[in-house]
Image: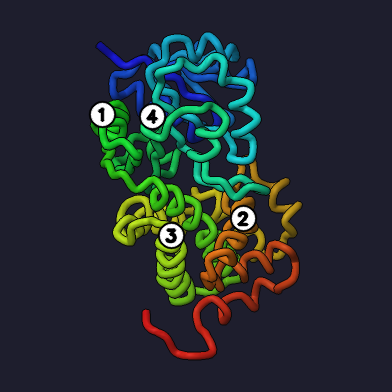
Amino acid sequence: MSRRVAVIGAGSWGTTFAKVLADGGADVTVWARRTSIAREIEFARRNAKYLRGITLPRGLRATTDATAALDGAEEVYLSVPSQTLRENLRGLREAIPADAILVSLMKGLERGTARRMSEVVAEETGTPAGRIAVLSGPNLALEIAKEQPTAAVVASASLETAQTVAITARNPYFRSFVNTDVVGTEFGGVLKNIVAVAVGIVDGVGFGENTKASIITRGLAEMTEFSVAYGARPETMAGLAGLGDLIATCESPLSRNNTAGRLLGQGLTLKETAQKMNQTAEGLSSIAPILELAEAKGVAMPIAQQVAAVVDGELDPRDIAPHLTTDDLPQGE
């Protein structure tokens, strides 16, 4: 019998993941805020605003009625902008089935609290850690919607929960692996966005592959040091949720964070960059809370600091690379 699941959010990633789940045999209903998008998904099997040219599976349902979307759901996949998650959960929590597994598809930190998304979910719904999972990896929405093969990691404090979600979230073109390192899996998804903004900035400036490779390599070291300081396993950063996601996000023009960085590198202000983009670049909103957490643990994060300076208009984008790729004193790789 197919699993009854709900996907909260009908942007590019929410819609794509609803397709992943439906193609794996799940009974899927998407909750959309806008009636036009819900009707287009339901009746035209399209979401032209976010996934132009993609035909969605037959039977994939969509609604603006959260209660209807969540009714009977065994698994609830959350895919809304990270800064709106708490507000959304407050409006949805009464309708979430008491025994449902809650799965975060988001890669961000909450401004003001620096909470990871799984922490926000736990706080707002009272769901125990063993029924919360996070999913992360090299997952560019449009490529997956086109059924290009990829993989992801599902992490939960409960290995059984992670395995349950991994079975639901798999199909011929999408494979899910499991671990119990929730901290590392989430921070990997957050931190690689900031590195991708940095790579986009130097790309926008016109620097070449050497500069970008230096940033990616040093960025992985920065990601690992930070994550381990907060209890993550270093091997998580070498896997799909760390290095895999980092490569995909830094190298692809489909990456929102890479695109945001490129626009900043071309001289646009943060406001102009936001206006030009159709979707949220989570890396931009995660910089401040990441730097707060880094300071609390005494972790040096020169890449994140220089990106913050460019975003704040305090550093010319052309001056970013020397700060990112070298230090005053030699150090190991």
Q: In this view, does 295 lie above or below 274?
A: below
Q: Is residue 143 visible?
A: yes
Give the side of residue 249 with respect to residue 296, left or right.
Answer: left
- Label 3 packing within 10 angstroms: few (<14), some (14-19), many (20+): many
In space, the residues marked 1 and 2 are separated at their CA atoms by 33 Å
Amino acid carrying mark 2 in the image: Pro
Disc 1 target residue: 167
Amino acid carrying mark 1 in the image: Ile
Provide residue 276's location: percent of width, then percent of height. Answer: 69, 47
In space, the residues marked 1 and 4 are separated at their CA atoms by 15 Å
Q: Of the residues under marks 4 and 3, which one precedes in the sequence?
A: 4
Disc 3 target residue: 227
Mark closer to the observer (1, 4): 4
Please report contact status of discs 3 and 1: CB closer than 8 Å, yes or no.
Answer: no
Q: Residue 131 carries which label?
A: 4
Q: Which mark is residue 289?
A: 2
Amino acid carrying mark 3 in the image: Ser
In space, the residues marked 3 and 1 are separated at their CA atoms by 27 Å
Q: Which element type, helix, strand or loop, lies under badge 1?
A: helix
